[in-house]
Every structure is written in C-alpha cells, then in structure tokens.
Amino acid sequence: MSSSNKAFTQALVNDHREMYEYHDKYIRAAGDRTTQEMWSRQITWEIATHIVAEEIVVFPLAGKHLGKEGTASTGTSTNTTTHREIHLQIKTLLRHLADFHPSTAQYDQVLEELMKLLRAHNEEDETKNLPALEDNLTDEESLNAAKSFQRKRHFVPTRAHSNSHSQGGRFESITAFLEAPWDKLKDQWVPFPTTEMIAAP
C-alpha cells in the first residue's frame, strides 16, 4: 500500500482539508457576523486539537521510526526551524486571535497569517514527513496511529464556566485547552479496550 493511501496519512490529510473547508466557509460568510463567529470557533478548535494531537502522537512516532532525522524535525535536537517551533508560532497566533472579534479587519488579518503558516506546515507534512514515516510503519501500525490521532475528537469546546477552565475533555476556550497541563492532555490518549476486546468471551 502506498504511503498516501495509508490510514495514518489519510487521517491527517482529512484534518488538513477540514481546516481549509472551514476557512473557506468563514470567508464566504463575510457580512454575516453570526455565521462567521460560528465558523471561526470551528476553525480555531480544529487547528488547536490537530496540533496537540500531532505533538502527542506524531512526534513520538517520528522520533522512534526516523531516528535522528525524526528527532531533529520534531524539535528534540537542534534544527533550523523545527515542527515544535512552528507549532509554537501557530499557538501564539491562535491566542492572538482571541484578542479580536471575528468579522473585524484585525481578526481576519491574524487568521490569514495563521492559515498561510498552517498551509505551508501541512504541505511539508503531506509531501515529506508523512511519506517518510509511513515507509517505516506497517499497515496495522498506520491504522493504530490513525485511531490514536483521532482521539483528539474527545476534546470538545464547551460554554464558559466561571469556576472551571475544563471539565474532563471539555474546555471553555482555545486558550484553556492550549494551556492545560500536558499530563492531563496526554492522559486522554491512554488506550482503552476496543469494543471487539470487550465483546470477546
């Protein structure tokens, strides 16, 4: 099976396409403030959960299977511009978006900067990093990695609560999610028995 068709690559590529789709819908809703607010929340949450899932799932796999090259690209050794540095830039822009209101010129400017950075990052992943990683994964390992990555769906935004930043896998804001204790986020990726395992006699 070619790397482009493997489950892990497809899971990440699907996420990339969703980001672009939500951004396009935000743009097409220009003039409709309420609709743009909804799409802005969808875009930012998709991006935030995606990059955190990459750090928890993709980075360790790259370090394990790609040796020094993978370690360098994920930022655990010296490199020109590492993925961790790019992720830090993305997180900074996500936080910056919170300073402005959707449908404003300031918000749109930061959003365009974020999407430009994200597209370049995603393109490098799809054309270079993921093919190299998939070449070192069996089909089963790729499928398991895809399932692990998709656990990011456990994190969902909720309405703000004055006395709590988060409730389980629910977070009141992008900032609360990005600033959550690392151990708390990582614990959400601890594997549980599959439905097949539970059903087995």
Image (spheres, rainbow, N blue to C red):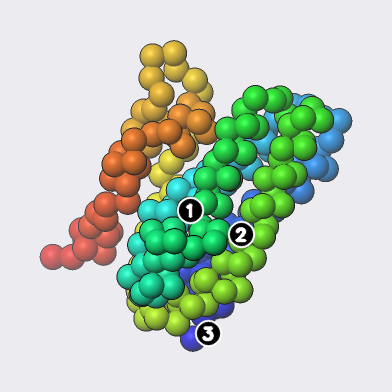
| 174 vs 113, nearest the viewer | 113
Instruction: Assess disc 2: are there few (<14), some (14-19) or many (≥20) residues with their C-alpha within 10 Å of its C-alpha.
Output: some
Q: Which residue is mark 2?
A: 121
User: x, y (%) of residue 165?
Assistant: 41, 24
Q: Which residue is mark 3?
A: 2
Which mark is in front, 2 or 1?
1
The residue at the point 38 percent across, 72 percent down is: 68
Amino acid, disc 1: Arg
The residue at the point 34 percent across, 41 percent down is: 182
Amino acid, disc 3: Ser
The residue at the point 63 percent across, 32 percent down is: 96
Residues marked 3 and 2 touching at CB (< 8 Å): no
Q: Which residue is mark 1?
A: 84
User: x, y (%) of residue 31?
Assistant: 86, 30
| 76 vs 179, nearest the viewer | 76
Is 44 above or below relative to 77?
above
Please give left or right for residue 126 compared with residue 157 in the image: right
Extreme residue in the top direction: 162
SS under mark 2 = helix
Note whether residue 17 is visible.
Answer: no
Mark 1 or mark 2, which is nearer the start of the sequence? 1
Quote the CA–CA distance across marks 3 and 2: 22 Å
Residues marked 2 and 1 touching at CB (< 8 Å): no
SS under mark 1 = helix
The residue at the point 56 percent across, 77 percent down is: 4
Instruction: Assess disc 3: are there few (<14), some (14-19) or many (≥20) residues with their C-alpha within 10 Å of its C-alpha.
Output: few
Please give left or right for residue 125 compared with residue 167 in the image: right
Is 66 above or below relative to 55?
below
Quote the CA–CA distance across marks 1 and 3: 27 Å
